[in-house]
Image (cartoon, rainbow, N blue to C red):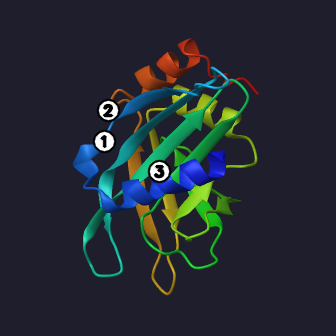
Amino acid sequence: MNKFLLLNLLNILFFLPSSLYAGSYEVEQDLMTDKKEIMFSIFSETTYKDSINQDREGLLFIRCSPEKVDLIINTFIYNGRNKEITLRWGTDEPFTERWTQDSRGIAFFNRKDPNKFISKLKENDSLTVQWKPYQSRPQAMKFDLNDQNFKEDIKQAEKDGCSFSS
């Protein structure tokens, strides 16, 4: 059920104008279990061209509950079977990782260690992500982690019950 809700949310995010959900922070409570689910995001400060040469912003999306953390980087463009992304924290050296792809091939999930990744988000001022869309040249986007209340959202999520410890 949770995967279904996440997929629907990503579908909604894909079709809505970015200004409608930028910097959102939401807490939902399951009426049957009283468990909270927290969702928040940040848009990239840079844009890149999609397959029809339109400017796009990437999205870094976190969904968490006391038991689970999902960390998603949404490119909003089809990436084929490519699962490799290159990451650069601030001015550090870039490195490449393999992440899980969503079923539509437009987003990458950090399944390896999302809590460690969130710790790095808290420690750094920026994150640059590069990937290779389907039949295209590599694209990159940069996130200003001090913008859009993102670090405050991480702190609020911890207060609201998310556990980001490894």
Q: At x 52% / y 74%, what residue is drawn?
A: 132
Give the labeled residue for mark 3.
Answer: 9
Instruction: List x then y, in percent, for residue 139.
Output: 43, 69
Give the labeled residue for mark 2.
Answer: 148
Packing grade of label 2 (10 A; few <14, some 14-19, many >=20) is: some
Checking the image for residue 22, the label placed there is 1
Which is more foreground, mark 3 or mark 2?
Answer: 3
140 w.r.t. 109: above or below: below
Q: Marks 3/1: CA distance?
A: 14 Å
User: In the figure, residue 58 lies in which quadrant?
Assistant: bottom left
Element type where label 3 sits in the image: helix
Q: Observer-nearest residue: 89 or 6? A: 6
Q: At x 56% / y 48%, what residue is drawn?
A: 5
- Name which of mark 3 and mark 2 comes first in the sequence: 3
Instruction: List x then y, in percent, for residue 124.
Output: 50, 32
Q: Observer-nearest residue: 124 or 39? A: 39
Instruction: List x then y, in percent, for residue 30.
Output: 59, 28
Badge 1 vs badge 2, beta-carbon distance below 8 Å: yes
Q: Marks 1/2: CA distance?
A: 8 Å
Badge 3 vs badge 1, beta-carbon distance below 8 Å: no
Packing grade of label 1 (10 A; few <14, some 14-19, many >=20) is: some
Q: Check disc 3 and give the amino acid type.
A: Leu
Q: Quadrant of the C terminus?
A: top right
Q: Observer-nearest residue: 85 or 25? A: 25
Q: At x 33% / y 36%, what residue is drawn?
A: 23
Element type where label 1 sits in the image: loop
- Name which of mark 3 and mark 1 comes first in the sequence: 3
Q: Check disc 1 and give the amino acid type.
A: Ala
- Name which of mark 1 and mark 2 comes first in the sequence: 1
Query: Furthest-bottom residue in view?
Result: 135
